[in-house]
Image: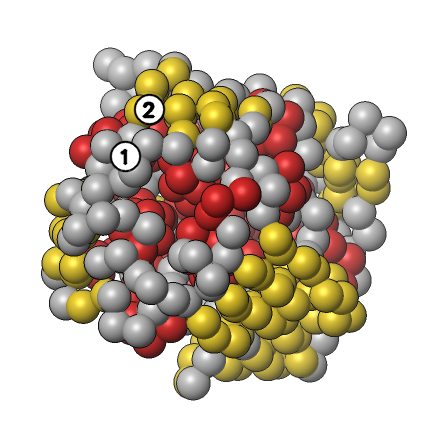
């Protein structure tokens, strides 16, 4: 599908952020290995979360999804069954990595596979620590390549032993997989990262009755085998800050734009992009709204201010809290005055696409002055953007980021593969069209 985005003369609206994707995955998985029924409201609407639901059903869990609500009847940790066929994770790295921890911990024979994009993503950094705990697992290419990739094959009967892990790269997905596997392991499983990544799994484990240890060095751990998890009858999912970021960016880059995005998860491991925008001179306010599902939430109130934006430097230790928003921040940087430098973001080369290359290529086509670095980008902002043809490269965040840039560009920006936005934000382009007075059209 191709969508055309034109320069917008306005952008206004009040929006409810879609349910958070990271929290939705984890809520369903923990409910699945609990005993009892959990009703999860405001579930993330995209395809990735449905991949997790389908995989859980294949493991013997009763999951019903209807109108943004999931009802999960857990099996308890010992009630999962071996799947009859490969677990299809679709395009979702979160599904594959977190469920790897589950099937490894439960000692189930299983094959985890996905679409061609997911098959390209590196998995050895997940498999190595699971194997160190006793999992019998392998990926493809182990004999001839430097990394392993899906399909991932787990053999039956492995009994795990807890151990301490020092991850070379901060990764909430790998950390979560190891903690989940640790629920079945004998002894303590502890994970230490070089930087602070998203802590949704730790928060949610505690909500489901599992004690989580926290060290002064930032390490987190669980003691296994854990007792059966308690299950909350109702679990409300907060709004997704990574999806909200695109609405915030659209309002910022359109002169006179005004938007409010309600109910957004304000967990400080997820709001690094707001801290960067504040340094860039953006007019974005957080209005506290309490909590949902154990997470703080806020409304984001945005006023368009493209002329007051200025460049900044994003340091490596900031990246874990804004890794999904780097493409969007690059679009803001292209409009801002001065230079923006992003370092420590090599992780983006192994997402759904090589996001650094895709951003650099697309912005250059739009007339921005951009230099691709091994672990980031350098963007000389302030040059007028012009419409261009952009390939989404099977990546939802690339599709949405260039749609935002197109609202501030002169001429038409045509995005090929716009349908990939549905992975995390179904209806995004319709919403953008309505808020921009028709500047977006198929």
Quarter placement of the C terminus: bottom left
| Image height of 342 relative to 257, above or below | above
Front residue (pair 109, 203): 203
- Point out the tag, 2 or 1, that comes first from the N-terminus: 1
The spot of residue 160 in percent (x, y) is 61, 37
The spot of residue 309 in percent (x, y) is 52, 40
Say which residue appears at 42% left-offset and 85% top-offset: 66
Which residue of the protein is positioned furthest toward the right in this rendering? 216
- Displayed quadrant of residue 189: top right
Say which residue appears at 44% left-offset and 42% top-offset: 332
- Residue 405 seen in render: yes
Taking the image as shown, residue 142 lies to the left or right of residue 20, namely left
Q: Residues within 10 Å of mark 1 (few under 14, many from 20)?
A: many
Report which residue position mark 2 lands on.
370
- Marks 2 and 1, how far apart in space? 7 Å
Report which residue position mark 1 lands on.
363
| Image height of 54 relative to 324, above or below | below
- Displayed quadrant of residue 213: top right
The spot of residue 38 in percent (x, y) is 62, 78
Quarter placement of the N terminus: bottom left
Label 1 near label 2: C-beta < 8 Å?
A: yes
């Amino acid at each position: 599908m191709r969508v055309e985005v034109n320069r917008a003369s306005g952008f206004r609206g009040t929006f409810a952020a879609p349910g958070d994707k990271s929290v939705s995955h984890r809520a369903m998985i923990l409910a699945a290995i609990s005993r009892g029924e959990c009703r999860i409201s405001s579930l993330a609407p995209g395809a990735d979360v449905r991949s997790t639901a389908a995989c859980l059903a294949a493991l013997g869990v009763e999951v019903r999804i209807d109108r943004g609500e999931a009802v999960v009847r857990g099996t308890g940790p010992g009630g999962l069954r071996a799947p009859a066929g490969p677990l299809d994770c679709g395009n979702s790295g979160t599904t594959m990595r977190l469920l790897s921890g589950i099937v490894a911990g439960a000692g189930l024979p299983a094959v985890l596979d996905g679409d061609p994009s997911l098959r390209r993503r590196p998995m050895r950094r997940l498999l190595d620590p699971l194997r160190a705990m006793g999992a019998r697992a392998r990926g493809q290419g182990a004999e001839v390549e430097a990394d392993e990739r899906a399909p991932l094959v787990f053999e039956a009967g492995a009994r795990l032993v807890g151990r301490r892990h020092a991850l070379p790269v901060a990764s909430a997905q790998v950390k979560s997989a190891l903690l989940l596997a640790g629920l079945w392991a004998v002894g303590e499983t502890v994970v230490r990262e070089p930087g602070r990544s998203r802590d949704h799994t730790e928060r949610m484990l505690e909500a489901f009755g599992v004690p989580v240890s926290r060290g002064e060095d930032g390490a987190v751990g669980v003691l296994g085998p854990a007792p059966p998890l308690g299950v909350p009858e109702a679990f409300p999912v907060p709004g997704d800050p990574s999806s909200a970021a695109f609405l915030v960016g659209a309002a910022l880059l359109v002169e006179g734009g005004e938007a409010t995005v309600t109910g957004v998860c304000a967990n400080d491991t997820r709001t690094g992009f707001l801290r960067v925008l504040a340094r860039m001179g953006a007019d974005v306010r957080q209005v506290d709204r309490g909590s949902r599902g154990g997470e703080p939430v806020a409304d984001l109130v945005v006023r368009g201010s493209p002329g007051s934006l200025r460049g900044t430097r994003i340091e490596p230790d900031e990246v874990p809290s804004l890794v999904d928003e780097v493409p969007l921040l690059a679009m803001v940087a292209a409009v801002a005055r001065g230079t923006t430098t992003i370092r420590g973001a090599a992780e983006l080369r192994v997402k759904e696409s090589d996001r650094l290359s895709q951003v650099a290529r697309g912005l250059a086509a739009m007339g921005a002055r951009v230099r691709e670095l091994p672990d980031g980008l350098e963007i000389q902002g302030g040059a007028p953007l012009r419409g261009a043809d952009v390939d989404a490269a099977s990546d939802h965040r690339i599709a949405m980021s260039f749609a935002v840039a197109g609202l501030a560009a002169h001429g038409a920006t045509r995005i090929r593969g716009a349908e990939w936005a549905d992975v995390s934000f179904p209806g995004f382009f319709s919403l953008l069209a309505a808020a921009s007075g028709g500047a977006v059209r198929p």
